[in-house]
């Protein structure tokens, strides 16, 4: 692809270069367009509707950081806290 990009687009050799390198002309044109296009701004991601609130997250982390739950898997922690009614 890099060798095909090295050929100037106005030279008229695009078809021959792409055929010789087994590269699609459409891919070459898309790649060239992406190189000269301005970068797209990153869209801020919307929080999931199922995400925990900050207070809930802090509470969960406080439980997970206790010494008695420190070495347990998430499934074991869930079962332990469920048994305790938390």
Image (spheres, rainbow, N blue to C red):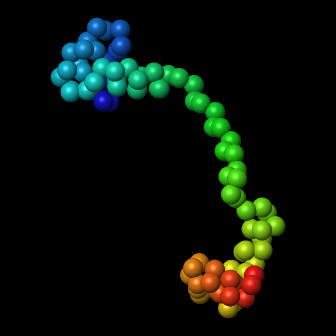
Q: Visible in this render: residue 69?
A: no
In the rendered image, the vertical position of residue 9 relative to residue 35, given as above or below: above
In the rendered image, the vertical position of residue 20 relative to residue 12, given as above or below: below
Residue 14 or 80: which is nearer the viewer? 80
Residue 5, quarter of the rendered image:
top left
Q: Is residue 11 left or right of residue 73?
A: left
Q: Locate residue 18, reporting x and y percent.
A: 24, 21
Q: Residue furthest bottom?
A: 68
Q: Visible in this render: residue 57?
A: yes
Q: Quadrant of the C terminus?
A: bottom right
Q: Locate residue 48, reporting x and y percent.
A: 68, 52
Residue 65 or 8: which is nearer the viewer? 65
In the rendered image, the vertical position of residue 71 relative to residue 46, given as above or below: below
Residue at 30% x, 20% y is: 25
Q: Residue furthest right?
A: 55
Q: Locate residue 80, reporting x and y percent.
A: 65, 87
Residue at 20% x, 20% y is: 19
Q: Locate residue 58, reporting x and y percent.
A: 77, 71
């Amino acid at each position: 692809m890099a060798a095909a990009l090295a050929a100037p687009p106005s030279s008229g050799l695009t078809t021959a270069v792409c055929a010789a390198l087994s590269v699609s002309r459409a891919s070459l044109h898309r790649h060239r367009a992406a190189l000269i296009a301005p970068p797209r701004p990153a869209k801020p991601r919307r929080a999931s509707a199922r995400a925990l609130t900050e207070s809930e997250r802090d509470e969960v982390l406080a439980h997970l950081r206790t010494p008695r739950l420190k070495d347990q898997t998430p499934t074991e922690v869930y079962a332990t806290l469920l048994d305790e009614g938390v």
